[in-house]
Image (spheres, rainbow, N blue to C red):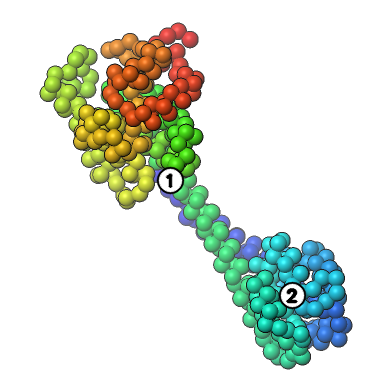
Amino acid sequence: MKEINFSFICAHLSEARKERNFIMEERNTLLIVDDVMINRELLKDIFEEGEYKLLEAADGEEAIEILEKNKEKIALIFLDLVMPKKNGLEVMHYMSLNNMIHTIPVIMITGEATVESDVKAYELGAADIIYKPFEPAVVTRRAKNIIELYKHRNFIEKELELRTQELLESRKQIENSNTFLINALSSVVEFRSLESGEHIQRVKKFTEIMLRHWRALYGEEQFTDEQIELIVNASALHDIGKIAIPDNILLKPGKLTDEEYAEMKKHTIYGCQMLEKFKQEENEFYRYCYDICRYHHERYDGRGYPDGLKGDDIPIWAQVVAIVDVYDALVSKRVYKPSFSIEETFRMIKDGECGTFSPKLLKCFDDAKEDFVKNTTKEQMGEEA
């Protein structure tokens, strides 16, 4: 597994914090919006000697124009409720629609408040409401508290966003490493059993084709793209238990004896035992791996192995890999057998000559025929290109 470079992550965090702190320091402007000049002047007097730059607007439309030009710099808005052109609630509605209300706090200032207008202001995202006439010390304290609160909240959200991105990147690295290890491990089985190293890749491709056709046909049993990816990767391990089968059985060119065949069938159990030893946690991917490894030789009529499961007791992902595995085995040329044509292979599977599959699965298989044809090469079938 690729080692995560924590030094790089820490350095990245440090740089990101510096960048965010710079952005937050830039929010050093207060916007005062009131149609009465004396009210604007009173608020300007309170903050004129402070650390903030001051902007002012005489109506809602002017406030929106200033917001658009300075939305990255404004730390707080004092917003009058009753104004011409656009009132305070309309300005807040605009801010909400344009994703400003979450990062720029609004203190509503009003002398004509009602319960209804207060509730509406808070519903639209007002951080506080101050009633006229106002006390300078109270206004100053409330403004500073709200600015600090929003500054801290924005910092936490940016930090969470960064950490989430880092976790996603780390998870992707791990998934890529796991995919490599799965393919490498499954290839060991192929080389031991003298099969083409492309068998696993074909099983994965055909499994994906089947799952996407299944989703298209049976909407009530859809798979997400993420689930399809997990199942496709898990399909590579369907025969991992063959590693534990003795060479004199696995590599035997002729027909197996009853005792040898009984041992060969145990590869489904051996594979699950191997998965158990390597298991780190019970999760969706492990369940797909386990089910596919154990049940891909079960049959719909209950005549499969190792557990004799019947019908829909067999997980659908295991059923899909089962039919895909049979298809690939039939159309592929092996040292011990010739290949069957695609048409003959489809006929044999649909007629039940290679075990019984569910009607829904066979319908899906038939629906996917064109994609199977496109992804079955002449080289695989032992024909000249």
The residue singled out by tag 1 in the image is 174
Q: Quadrant of residue 362?
A: top left
Q: Quadrant of residue 314?
A: top left
Image height check: is 80 above or below 289?
A: below
Three-letter amino acid code of the residue under disc 2:
Ile
Relative to 203, is 93 on the left or the right? right
Label 2 element class: strand
Relative to 368, is 279 on the left or the right? left
The residue singled out by tag 2 in the image is 77
Image height check: is 253 above or below 260?
A: above
- The residue sitting at 29% across, 46% down in the picture is 279
- The residue sitting at 67% across, 71% down in the picture is 124
Task: Name the disc covering residue 196, or none.
Answer: none
Image height check: is 220 above or below 116?
A: above
Residue at the outermost top position: 384
Residue 102 visible (yes or no) = yes
Q: Position of residue 35 (x, y in %)?
A: 85, 79
Residue at the outermost left position: 259
Image height check: is 120 above or below 352?
A: below
Relative to 375, is 292 on the left or the right? left
Relative to 304, is 103 on the left or the right? right
Q: Position of residue 288 (x, y in %)?
A: 35, 41
Q: Quadrant of residue 148?
A: bottom right
Closest to the observer, 225 or 54: 225
- The residue sitting at 38% across, 30% down in the picture is 361
Q: Quadrant of the N terminus?
A: top left
Q: Position of residue 355 (x, y in %)?
A: 28, 23
Three-letter amino acid code of the residue under disc 1:
Ile
